[in-house]
Image: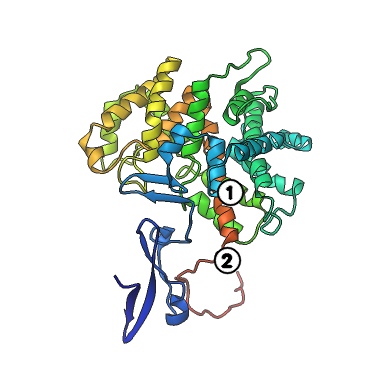
Amino acid sequence: MSKFAELKLGKQTYKLPIITGTEGEKAIDITNLRAESGLITFDPGFGNTGSCTSKITYIDGNKGILRYRGIPVDELAEKSTFVETAHLLIHNKLPSKCQLNSFSQLLTKHSLMHEDMRHFFDGFPRGSHPMYILSTMINALSAFYPNVDAESLKGDIDETAARLISIVRTFAAFAYKKSIGEPIVYPRHDLSYCANFLNMMFDSPVKPYEIDPEIVKALDRLLIIHADHEQNCSTSAVRVIGSAQVNIYSTISAGINALSGPLHGGANQAVISMLEGIVKRGGNVDKVIEKAKDKKNPFRLMGFGHRIYKTVDPRAKIIKQSCHDILEKLNINDPLLDVAMELEEKATNDEYFLSRNLYPNVDFYSGIIYRAIGIPSNMMTVMFALGRLPGWISQWKEMISTKGAKIARPRQIYKGRALTKYQAPQDC
């Protein structure tokens, strides 16, 4: 096969290099197209545009493949921990026992936030969404830890990565405790990452939290499968903002804001809102299925289908069993969860959904698990952010380390008025 694609414009032919990835995927390199021809490409939403080359995550949406640094995500979910997976993403390799212990110690060291930051929580109105609190608090870290940029991080990525991954967990738990009016719970040095978070969320002076290893493992698995997902909206935001060599805390804050949208990270919360609506209207799942199949009805079945995956979402396959196991173990009597399981069963046996590749996705199952273990719906997108942090950091690190990296600057096609002369304001 030729290493070039040819673009013919009138009598002129332009040779465009073809780039081939590790797994055989191909792209036409248009880096010099504008300089040579005066033309740009037009691709709303960047659905067919590769913005970078990357060695972090590989996805094949047709085959349902997701790998971090070459390792299938199902292997990591089964055998690894979130902390180990975070190290893999950031450093391009699984850690040795000594490296893992060192990274874990850094997480413990940076789990406490600066005491002056506690007062910031008092400034948020009651009922503020935790995602907005989280993004604001992360942005504020820029003032407490200045000069954290591309230059200063050349030898300090572990320290900053650990601070971010650890303190986001503390911010999230503190925001939740404030929202329900309970005293905050400080992190403990003797607990694992996920166990610590659960304890900070649910421990109380009047009702101590009992840590269940199965729930801890389920949370660990959820964070692992959310750790990275290639060039999605929030990751692209991190790369675009970071390309201006913005402080990493402000850069990550931008990623959190992008993730908060209902079409991105907010989808798991949207699933729960949909289920609440179904229960409120009587819990008739058959009627809901018919509404979803009616082209004239604006109703959307949240938690089904995925823009990238044309088969079963590999992350959904991993946590589907966890979902059923947790519900069985906790023996929860919750009509929302009952409706969710009935919806899953009927939709996955309906030819309409199967023929359109509308399988339950990761947002469908994650929302159910989070609700089962006590995470409120407005915290579910925050949980997504906790899991995605290692991916954002690794993408940012890769971007600033790329030789010749440039500030992101997309082009546009202007559709406004042609040259128009200025006219002074007319009298009324």
Which residue sits furthest top? 206
Q: Residue 229 vs residue 144: left or right?
A: left
Q: Secondary structure at mark 2?
A: loop
Q: Position of residue 225 (x, y in %)?
A: 46, 38
Q: Position of residue 370 (x, y in %)?
A: 49, 28
Query: Where is residue 246, by image quadrant?
Result: bottom right
Q: Secondary structure at mark 1?
A: helix
Q: Position of residue 68 (x, y in %)?
A: 46, 46
Query: Where is residue 423, by image quadrant?
Result: bottom right
Q: Residues within 10 Å of mark 1 (few under 14, many from 20)?
A: many
| Alpha carbon distance from label 1 to label 2 | 18 Å
- Whether residues under marks 1 and 2 lie with C-beta atoms below 8 angstroms apart, the answer is no
Q: Which residue is mark 1?
A: 393
> In the rendered view of the protein, which quadrant contains the N terminus?
bottom left
Q: Residue 155 vs residue 341: left or right?
A: right
Q: Which residue is mark 2?
A: 403
Q: Nearer the viewer, mark 1 or mark 2?
A: 2
Q: Residues within 10 Å of mark 2 (few under 14, many from 20)?
A: few
Rendered residue at 63%/25% (across/down)? 191
Rendered residue at 47%/79% (across/down)? 35
Q: Residue 7 vs residue 237: left or right?
A: left
